[in-house]
Image (tube, rainbow, N blue to C red):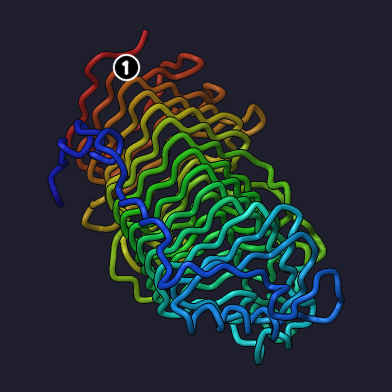
Amino acid sequence: MPMFDRRFFVRGAALALGGSVVSRTKAFEPGESLEHSVTDFGARPDRQAPQTAAIQSAIDALSRRGGGTLRFPPGVFVAGALQLQTNIRLVFERESVLKGSGDWRDYGEGRWLDALITARDARNIRIEGPGLIDGADCTNPKGEEGFRGPHGIVFLGCRDVVVADVRIARTGNYGLYCRDCAEFELRNLKVRGGHDAVHAQACAKFNIRDCDFRTGDDCLAGCDNRDFEVVGCQINSSCNGFRLGCANLAVKKCKFWGPGEYPHLISVRRGAPRTNMLAAFVHFAPKDRSPKLPSDHWLVQDCTIDKVDQVYGYDYQRGLWQTGQPAKRLRFVNVKAAGIVKPLRVRGDADRQFELAFDKVEIALREDRADQPVIDATQFGALVFQDVVLQNSGKSPVIVARDGGKLCLDRVRSIPKSETPYVFERIEEVRIDRPAD
């Protein structure tokens, strides 16, 4: 079993105090300073017929000249699949809408990667608002689960990308899907409805700031990622806030709340719409993706979590899509969670690599679900709690811990007071420094 690394917890993981985990993207510099409107190439707003060919011809013309800016003026422009290229900047002006066709055939042959906008192996891309990208709730009877349609935007092997000040709504599948991408900035992006807001697979150096995600599925998802920073975001879901696998993740000044404003679409198809938000955070490393990276060095700081079923969930033995790689070090600092339905539950790997630290954390179970522990951990390397308040009904211990390495409690308070606030079994070292008053 690896020894507890106190440095990780004492430092606050440089992510909290030492600045951003990712570098900011560079200013947009196309090969030539060209700027056009889609109407210059024959696209016309407010027509029912798709304007795909005209919009694509505008993108291609700019690309041939080394890149430039393409503007969408006010009005609704209907389109199918569009291919974005290096050095292209799309600007959706106020009251402009790029609306996806309602016919899945307009996006290709019904493949999983079909999307309204796709960029492959491209560099220096900007997509800016304040307009709207509307997926029109396009479904595909041949798609995943018998109904999922095209994504909003797909990036494959792209670098140096900014998506800012734009709204994305009603996508047939993910709002943004990114694979093998790096150096992304998502800023003031609003996503409504659809499935996952942002799904990243094998991506690095993502800076996500001041975004507002309200989705039927996960807000941020994917695995094999590294160096993500999420700051100042609004997170509302009928699934999970983060279903993520990531090495070096910082989540700061974010608000999580349930129930979801948009139902989980699979439950809608089954005739029983569900809106409860399952978790703020769950580990994600499905074996069928053959993940290479564990989740490690997570910092959650200055966040609030309200009316969510679970703060965090991880089960390396039997967890859904959690057994491909383990989770390791996770730290919560100045986090308040209320109205919680289930314990924060951890079942780590056999090597006990999981370490959890709380510093100035409060978790309160919902009144009608309060007859259970707040923390339930098995097979872990270390639990280190300092200035922590845990609230249940008092009929159960607030912490249940089994088969662990080190457990350190410093000013941990249970509400209400209990004669047996803790149950510890087979813990190698237990230290209670200063019991709370």
* Residue in front for this viewpoint, 223 or 159: 159
Picture quadrant where residue 44 is located? bottom right
Residue shown at the point (58%, 70%) measured from the top left: 153
Residue 37 appears at what percent x and percent y? 66, 69
* Residue in front for this viewpoint, 100 or 370: 100
Position of residue 100 relative to residue 255, above or below, is below
Picture quadrant where residue 108 is located? bottom right
Farthest left residue in view: 3
* Residue in front for this viewpoint, 337 or 402: 337
Q: Amino acid at mark 1?
A: Arg
Residue shown at the point (36%, 61%) measured from the top left: 183
Is 12 on the left or on the right of 217, as rendered? left
* Residue in front for this viewpoint, 316 or 186: 186
Picture quadrant where residue 411 is located? top left
> Which element carries disc 1, helix, strand or loop?
strand
Is 394 on the left or on the right of 215, as rendered? left
Query: Mark 1 = which residue?
Result: 411
Residue 404 appears at what percent x and percent y? 25, 43
Residue 407 appears at what percent x and percent y? 24, 33
Farthest front residue in view: 33
Residue shown at the point (51%, 49%) measured from the top left: 187
Q: Across the whole image, how many numbered discs are drawn on residues?
A: 1
Q: Residues within 10 Å of mark 1 (few under 14, many from 20)?
A: some
Quadrant of the image for the C terminus?
top left
Is 54 on the left or on the right of 389, as rendered? right
Farthest bottom residue in view: 109
Residue shown at the point (39%, 76%) measured from the top left: 157
Position of residue 329 relative to residue 170, above or below, is above
Residue 196 appears at what percent x and percent y? 59, 61
